[in-house]
Image (spheres, rainbow, N blue to C red):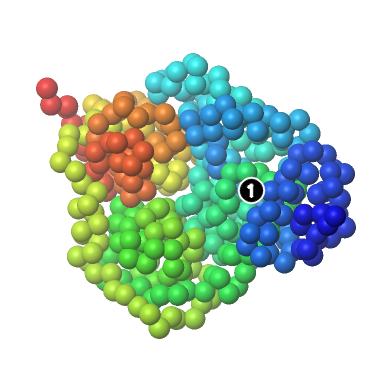
Amino acid sequence: MKMVGFYMDLTKQEKEMLEGKQGSAVKKSMEILVALGEIYNAKKLVDVESVQIAGVSYDNLGDAGLEFLSELAKDGKVKVLTTLNPAGMDLENYKTLGISEEFAVKQRMVIEAFAKMGIITTCTCTPYLVGNSPHFNQHIAWSESSAVAYANSVLGARTNREGGPSALAAALTGKTPLYGMQLDENRQARIKVMVKGLGRGTERFGALGKAIGEKIKDKPAYIVGVKEATIEELKSLSASIATYGGAAIFHMKGITPNKTKAPKEKIIITKEDIENALKSMNDDCEVDFVSVGCPHASIKEIAKLAELLKGKKVKKEFWVTTARPTKRIADAVGYSKTIEEAGAKFAADTCCVVAPIKGRFKCLATDSAKGCYYAAAKNKFKIKIMPVEKIVEEACKEMKQ
């Protein structure tokens, strides 16, 4: 009987992995990858340089997911640099953020299983800011939507949007099927987007991603008319274009590195479109929760917050979500002290999308279009999107009685 997957052009080493000669975790991983390859008609597997795994929060995994990880951790060891998406809590400061001890026990077990496999437990949706930063044209296997869009578009690396199991399988084998965004032909732009009246700021780039995503869905876009963009603005755009449309790649003339042909089909995104996107993320509500860092805040964003909060006192729950390594830099240079003296809290290792906070708040203020989407869809919060300067002002206002 022909072994599943042998219709693909597998190497001798890959066949041995599939046969179980490198252990049960590798065998299971190869079965996942070969099945995925068969679904998408991949002709072979390709070596990956790095992996980023989603499905880390116990709030999403549950006991079944924890059991799956624990089984793989018995003999599984990663073969390439691998980092994690945010967990369901700050691994050091969860009590201050109102996370129960019962949840914390389970979340630590999840992290311990990943660590046992040799995974770097950074717990961040911006791995490219903390050392997992692949080169142009390298094959990788990442799974968080904003990180995937950023890696493909801004870094020029090559990744499909992996599921948690397929990303982990890639980490344990060092392989991924060669299909989709790994191939040149699927990375080409299919629609030209002419942008007018964008302006600057993470909230406006997030609104741009929303406006584009809702119109073109998952088509790769060639965006023209944006003259400048910071890393922070590009991560905001990557997050929102993936959230509201599902695109895994975009091209921005003069800014992103991939080469693409200019498509014949085109649309125009006007200043009015961007303003309408912003209005759609502004509910009539009193803010009781403030958050910055979706995707995770960079050290530059934290420095800006420290500047804005210096000498002030916040009156509302205020989370700054970021990667643990970034938080340690902020500690070293004094940004954390300034922010925490103002009454804001760091939520390292986690974010407002995956933390179990449903029912705790009513109205979120943020600069993140992605944060707005999940606050409304998952946690049933009312939302307000605004620039960081306005967020700080809002945080310092007294709640109405």
- Three-letter amino acid code at disc 1? Ser
**Residue 106 placement (x, y as % from top left):** 56, 22
Q: How many marks?
A: 1
**Residue 293 placement (x, y as % from top left):** 40, 42
Q: Going by the picture, which residue comes out furthest to the top? A: 101
Task: Name the image quarter holding the N terminus.
Answer: bottom right
Q: Is residue 291 visible?
A: no
**Residue 161 placement (x, y as % from top left):** 55, 54
**Residue 284 placement (x, y as % from top left):** 15, 41
Q: Residue at x 24, y 69 (%)?
A: 270
Task: Name the image quarter holding the C terminus.
Answer: top left
Give the vertical position of 268 relative to 218 (above or below).
below
Residue at the spot of label 1: 166
Quarter where residue 222 is shown? bottom left
Give the vertical position of 307 relative to 173 (above or below).
above
Q: Residue at x 59, y 33 (%)?
A: 65
> Tag 1's secondary structure?
helix
Q: Is residue 267 left or right of residue 53?
A: left
Q: Residue at x 29, y 74 (%)?
A: 268
